[in-house]
Image (cartoon, rainbow, N blue to C red):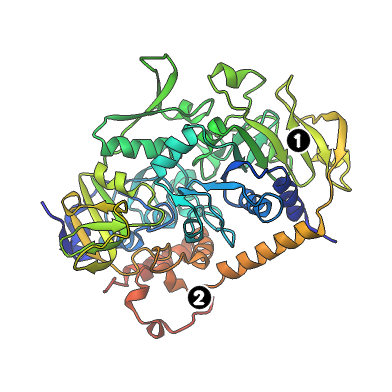
Amino acid sequence: MQAKIQTLQEAIATHLFDGATVAMEGFTHLIPFAAGHEIIRQGFKNLELVRMTPDMIYDQLIGAGCVRKLRFSWGGNPGVGSLYRLREAIEKGYPQPLEVDEHSHAAMAAAYAAGASGMPCAIFKGYYGADLEKVNPSIKTLACPFTGERLVAVPAIRPDVTIIHAQKASKKGDVSLEGIVGVQKEAVLAAKAAIVTVEEIVDELQPSSPNAVILPSWTVSAVVHVPGGAKPSYAHGYYSRDNKAYIAWEAISKDREKFNEWLQELKSTDYAV
Amino acid sequence: MQYNSTELMTVVASRILKNSDVCFVGIGLPSAACNLARLTHAPDITLIYESGTIQTKPDVLPLSIGDGELCETALTTVSVPEMFSYWLQGGRITVGFLGGAQIDKFGNINTTVVGDYHKPKVRLPGGGGAPEIAAFCHTIYVIMKQSPRAFVDKVDFITSFGHGDGPGQRKAMGLNTSGPSKIITDLCIMETEEATGEFIVTSIHPGVARETIQENTGWKIRFAGEVATTDAPTLQELEALRVLNEKTKMAHQAKIPCRKFLFARLSAVPSDAMGGVCQG
């Protein structure tokens, strides 16, 4: 099976459904903003979102009322402060209550790797003395069968859909990404379906090294040409992080009315290539 | 030369880092202190950010943990699962530098919630990498502004374990790392007292009274038998820090401020169609 080259509207409409578990990954770099915005426009509900660092894009999806549950490890606007839509959902149940399944980065990274490896759970060393283990029933401890050492297990992440943004894809749908590659390879390989938005579609991929992160066409469901699709995060080699926009988000996120204005504006704007 | 309390904290924190340290760097004050150390007395210090960038030498301070600058100036960039498993859990990192919303006298840190976890008064960002940074780095330094709200008798939630409620607990859990050993504040330096596992004041910054330290600490703070006076920042240290901050500020403001930038459709539209430079 090869990836289909689709439009953003088609790819989101084909693979998303209400209640789906969706992971949109990108560790500060290559965050699939345009795809997230299209999910808001198409009005999906009760999504279970997964992401190590839910930043501005998850704040927007939560504020827009698309999200029922969040599995995450750090929810803030990096270097700026809070995500106020996320906070209002947790603290005040607005616009709807948000169930949280909270972990550490080490646990989330291991859980993605477990998902990609066909494991039911991830086993690692962590959470020594940390209270998260007391409040999250999906964090369990076990003894190493060989040494007796205390280990931790968390369920593998197996998203219905993973969405990432990458620099390039070939016409055949092979994908390459470089720079801070985060946990995207694991997130794609862990998922039942994967959508990849890209800066460029080229005739042939010419990776800069044989060790660049490559996702062969047959591991991806849909490839979408979305130049600028990671803005205001960045795409290494194409554009840099718009830190100013992250700083500006603070005031919009903080105020329901300003957020709703932003949301109306987003909904009335179609992404067009 | 005049300096403010943030500059003082950053300079003092930078001084405790050594050239031979392999340092896991958090965003904000820790990042400023680590890069200041690199630009002054520790040019070969190894800085690692959890985004996967190893041995990075940024020209400007990153706003986020994964700015492109970090990757471009790194010796290598690894994936996030590799960072947390081979490098952090593997025990290759000597110093972890953390901040937090609350810290208690045993160096337990809270960055998760104020109030009850299930009905929080304030929902904070959460642990991120910190629970395992606190476990696996050989030692932990903490940098935080001192106030009674931040320096509390008991944290609402232990995000990252320090010394629990006394000495010996880390060992009992199978941890061989030292845990938090120094806290650098805007008023003083605190260090762990071995016998009690409690943080006590070992150095007071110039011009700070003992009463001020107590007023800004939520527990009955104790002072070491011999308390030093912290050296004031030197001209060279302050200049290096200010140049770094100035470069950083310019870099972070280089983009055009525009609400439409918050939509991911920019490169699809010529910039004049967006009305050129947007104001505000």
Tag 1: amino acid: Met
Query: In the picture provided, is A251 more to the left or to the right than A114?
Result: right
Residue A111 picture location, percent across and down: 34, 36
Residue at numbered disc 2: B256
Q: Is B129 left, or right, of A266 in this rendering? A: right
**Secondary structure type for disc 2:** loop
Q: Are marks 1 and 2 on the same chain?
A: yes
Residue drawn at point x = 84 percent, y = 61 percent: B2
Q: Where the C terminus of chain A falls, by quadrant?
A: bottom left
Front-most of residues A95 and B189: B189
Q: Which residue is tagged 1?
A: B190
Q: Is residue A264 above or below residue A31?
A: below
Chain letter behind tag 1:
B
What is the x, y in percent for residue A248?
A: 52, 66
Q: Mark 2: which amino acid?
A: Ile
Coordinates of residue B158 in the picture (x, y in percent): 57, 31
* Residue B162 falls in image quadrant: top right
In the displayed structure image, the side of residue A43 where residue A123 appears, left or right: right
Q: Residue visible at 54% across and 75% down?
A: B280
Dots 1, 2 in contact, CB < 8 A: no
Q: Nearer the viewer, residue B133 or B138?
A: B138
Near-viewer residue (A242 or A251): A242
The mark nearer the N terminus, 1 or 2, is: 1
Q: How many marks?
A: 2
Q: Nearer the viewer, mark 1 or mark 2?
A: 1
